[in-house]
Image (tube, grey):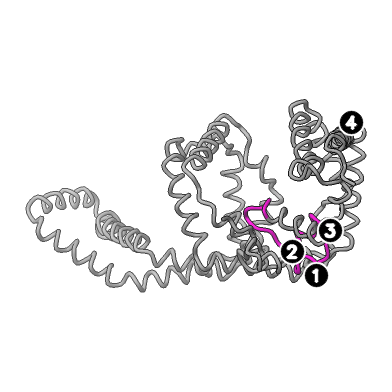
């Protein structure tokens, strides 16, 4: 028996009204959970459930060292630093500099004396570092020039003013000075030759002098003397304030230095040593924490369920209850729910709701996984898909295998998948 066309149309219209009513009821229910006491209850329920899950899952099940390194690269190492970002950071530095110029906070207000003493004590124990600093200092050409000039000036001054003969003969000092002046006027070449010989003698012997200086400094700068030097330094600088520190840097210097710092960072982050340091740190982190349950790890670093609830209640609730946010949430929720309640009816107006409900579970699961992957342009891991869908690892990997065969997704890097764009 053929159903009259008018009956089919009436049935479709009735189903559309029912779906619209169901959509509105569902929408209002969701929006109520995002307001007032219902929002607080929702946050409490979700955070409690999340921390219960954290109590079951270990950190290594959630993310592994390779994934952590890949995330670090994408977030920290790969993104360029735009001119706009550089200009913003430069302006921030200039404003901080301006604030510090007006500030009178003393160093002792930032670094207490007892903590300064502990710092000095620990630095004094770095014997090898102290010796290396002394070695580098006395080996520098600047130090060599300085010592040469000091020796030359000292020897010349001694000959002129401290000669025993001159000191014991009344008036001889004045006579010698007059004689020196006459000699300077008449025998400049001779005096110049003596000066040159004296300088060459000092330069030829400077390395031995420097070695003696190094040995002297290594022995003289013992723990007692270094402690005294540390105390003297504190006496001089403890009353310095932030205003004093900014006097050495002008705002224009900040602007000229900023591009150099940016370029240095861009070069450093590409260097092998930087990668090795990051990898070593990540590997040690997972050696120490990988087998811990996530909840235990979070509590060790001071993140507790109660703390998260408090912060979300104070931050998320006022934010989500703003009218502009509520209107946005209603718009997006309606779009999401509408896709479920209305889209299939528009595509297949003559089919019954019961037929649509008989879609295979496999197809629905595949669509759910594909939707998660398409919603993350940077790529997703199995762990993230599991978090979003609740499916088991084996089920997700089976779906990923099929989607790759269908050329709907591809592997970006090991363990990370993205949608194919056609």
Marks 2 and 1 sit apart, C-alpha to C-alpha, by: 10 Å
Question: Within the magenta stretch, is there residue 387?
Answer: yes
In the picture provided, is 38 more to the left or to the right than 144?
A: right
For the residues carrying marks 2 and 1, which lies nearer the camera in this image? 1
The residue where tag 1 is placed is 394
Disc 4 from disc 3: Cα separation: 28 Å
- Residue 150 lies in magenta, yes or no? no
Q: Quick check: marks 2 and 1 in contact, CB under 8 Å? A: no
Identify residue for label 4: 36
**Tag 1's secondary structure?**
helix
The answer to whether 29 is drawn above or below residue 396 in the figure is above
| Label located before the other in sequence (2 or 1) | 2
- Do the CB atoms of the residues marked 1 and 3 lie less than 8 Å apart? no
Residue at the outermost top position: 323
Q: Main secondary structure of the magenta part?
A: helix
Left or right: 104 as drawn, with respect to 134: right
Q: Tell me the SS state at disc 4.
A: helix
């Amino acid at each position: 028996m053929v159903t009259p066309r008018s009956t089919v149309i009436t049935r479709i219209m009735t189903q559309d009204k029912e779906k619209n009513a169901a959509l509105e009821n569902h929408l209002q229910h969701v929006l109520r959970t995002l307001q007032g006491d219902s929002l607080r209850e929702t946050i409490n329920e979700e955070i409690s459930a999340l921390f219960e899950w954290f109590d079951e899952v270990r950190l290594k099940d959630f993310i592994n060292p390779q994934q952590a390194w890949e995330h670090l690269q994408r977030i920290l190492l790969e993104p360029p630093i735009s001119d706009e970002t550089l200009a913003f950071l430069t302006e921030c530095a200039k404003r901080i500099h301006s604030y510090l110029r007006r500030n009178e906070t003393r160093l002792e207000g930032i670094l207490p004396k007892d903590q300064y003493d502990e710092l000095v004590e620990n630095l004094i124990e770095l014997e090898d570092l102290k010796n290396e600093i002394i070695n580098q200092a006395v080996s520098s050409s600047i130090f060599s020039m300085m010592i040469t000039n000091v020796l030359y000036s000292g020897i010349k001054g001694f000959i002129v003013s401290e000669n025993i003969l001159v000191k014991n003969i009344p008036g001889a000092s004045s006579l010698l000075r007059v004689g020196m002046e006459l000699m300077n006027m008449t025998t400049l070449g001779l005096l110049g030759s003596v000066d040159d010989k004296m300088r060459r003698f000092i330069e030829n012997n400077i390395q031995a002098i420097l070695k003696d200086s190094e040995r002297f400094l290594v022995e003289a700068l013992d723990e007692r003397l270094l402690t005294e030097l540390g105390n003297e330094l504190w006496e001089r600088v403890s009353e310095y304030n932030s205003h004093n520190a900014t006097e050495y840097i002008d705002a224009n210097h900040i602007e000229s230095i900023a591009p150099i710092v940016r370029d240095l960072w861009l070069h450093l982050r590409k260097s092998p040593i930087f990668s090795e340091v990051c990898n070593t740190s990540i590997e040690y982190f997972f050696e120490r924490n990988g087998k811990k349950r996530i909840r235990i790890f979070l509590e060790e670093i001071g993140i507790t369920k109660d703390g998260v609830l408090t912060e979300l209640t104070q931050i998320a609730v006022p934010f989500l209850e703003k009218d502009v946010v509520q209107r946005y949430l209603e718009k997006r929720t309606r779009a999401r729910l509408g896709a479920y309640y209305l889209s299939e009816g528009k595509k297949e107006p003559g089919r019954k709701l019961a037929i649509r409900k008989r879609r295979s579970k496999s197809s629905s699961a595949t669509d759910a996984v594909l939707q998660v992957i398409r919603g993350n342009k940077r790529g997703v891991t199995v762990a993230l898909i599991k978090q979003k869908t609740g499916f088991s690892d084996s089920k997700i990997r089976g779906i990923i295998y099929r989607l790759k065969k269908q050329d709907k997704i591809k592997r970006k890097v090991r363990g990370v998948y993205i949608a194919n764009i056609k």
